[in-house]
Image (cartoon, rainbow, N blue to C red):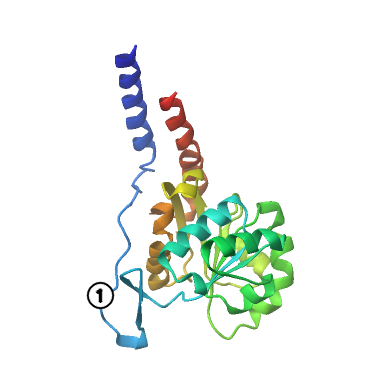
């Protein structure tokens, strides 16, 4: 009956939350630090949607515009000026349709690799090497710093760096499907080369996709299994 179902759901919910504690690494869903008005060091704020954010990651590029890449692009365009967002996709028509929806720009892979401060690698794991191999020279010749963001399951940060050809800053993320409606959980593991300011702004940019949980990379595969299955539990409760 309904009482038994509610009791079972409550017990499962408690067990699920307990499992997400990860032996001393509880989920942190608090928002990232906001800009406090300090302009020391030459960092100037820009007004975006009524909020001041750092210009550390000013230009944002997407290599791939599939279901998850498109969902993340929609979230980013809520926090950043769409004119600073550049989309590239193997099928150009898909990038053009998304750009028309969001008011951002389309380009080619090499342009994203050469000009964007934050580069989302939004392709399937088996396609990553084919994507990055032609871009290694462009990334190596960049005079300015950049951050790669991979959402490819099973590919470590070290492997992404190897395929990119440099010991560059990488943020590894694992989003789940509710990110498409801004209600997801995004696991986030930056490597040691990602500055604290970049991580803070990344959290601001991603806030429109859902809750951000930063954790050590060694836990992201286990955590991703739980957050990936979480929506299925919600569907089961609904049924």
x then y, percent, for residue 46: 36, 78
Asked if residue 53 lies left or right of residue 102, the reply is: left
- Please tell me whether residue 215 is drawn above or below residue 117 in the rendered image: above
Residue at screen point 33% across, 15% down: 2
Q: Quadrant of the N terminus?
A: top left
| Foreground residue among 174 and 26 | 174
Question: Which residue is label 1 attached to?
Answer: 36
Residue at screen point 45% across, 23% down: 239
> What secondary structure is marked by label 1?
loop
x then y, percent, for residue 110: 68, 74
The picture quadrant where one finds residue 121 is bottom right
| Foreground residue among 134 and 77 | 77
- Please tell me whether residue 152 is drawn above or below residue 178 in the rendered image: below
- In this orientation, does residue 172 appear? no
Numbered disc total: 1
The picture quadrant where one finds residue 20 is top left
Asked if residue 92 lies left or right of residue 115, the reply is: right
- In this orientation, does residue 162 appear? yes
Residue at screen point 39% across, 36% down: 19
Residue farthest to the front? 100
Residue at screen point 47% across, 76% down: 58
x then y, percent, for residue 127: 71, 56
């Amino acid at each position: 009956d309904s009482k038994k179902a509610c009791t079972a759901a409550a017990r499962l919910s408690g067990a699920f939350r307990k499992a997400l504690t990860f032996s001393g690494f509880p989920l942190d869903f608090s928002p990232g630090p906001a800009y406090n008005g300090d302009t020391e060091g030459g960092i100037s704020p820009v007004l975006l949607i009524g909020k001041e954010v750092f210009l550390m990651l000013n230009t944002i590029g997407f290599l791939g515009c599939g279901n998850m890449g498109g969902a993340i692009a929609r979230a980013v365009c809520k926090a950043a000026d769409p004119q600073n967002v550049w989309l590239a996709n193997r099928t150009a028509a898909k990038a053009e349709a998304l750009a028309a929806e969001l008011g951002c720009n389309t380009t080619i892979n090499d342009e994203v690799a050469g000009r964007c401060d934050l580069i989302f690698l939004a392709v399937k794991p088996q396609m990553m090497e084919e994507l990055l191999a032609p871009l290694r020279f462009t990334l190596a010749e960049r005079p300015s710093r950049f951050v790669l963001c991979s959402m490819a399951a099973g590919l470590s940060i070290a492997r992404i760096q190897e395929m990119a050809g440099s010991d560059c800053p990488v943020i590894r993320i694992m989003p789940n499907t509710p990110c498409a409606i801004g209600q997801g959980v995004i696991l986030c593991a930056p490597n040691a080369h990602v500055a604290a300011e970049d991580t803070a702004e990344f959290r601001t940019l991603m806030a429109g996709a859902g809750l951000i949980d930063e954790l050590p990379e060694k836990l992201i595969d286990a955590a991703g299994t739980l957050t990936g299955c979480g929506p299925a539990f919600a569907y089961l409760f609904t049924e």
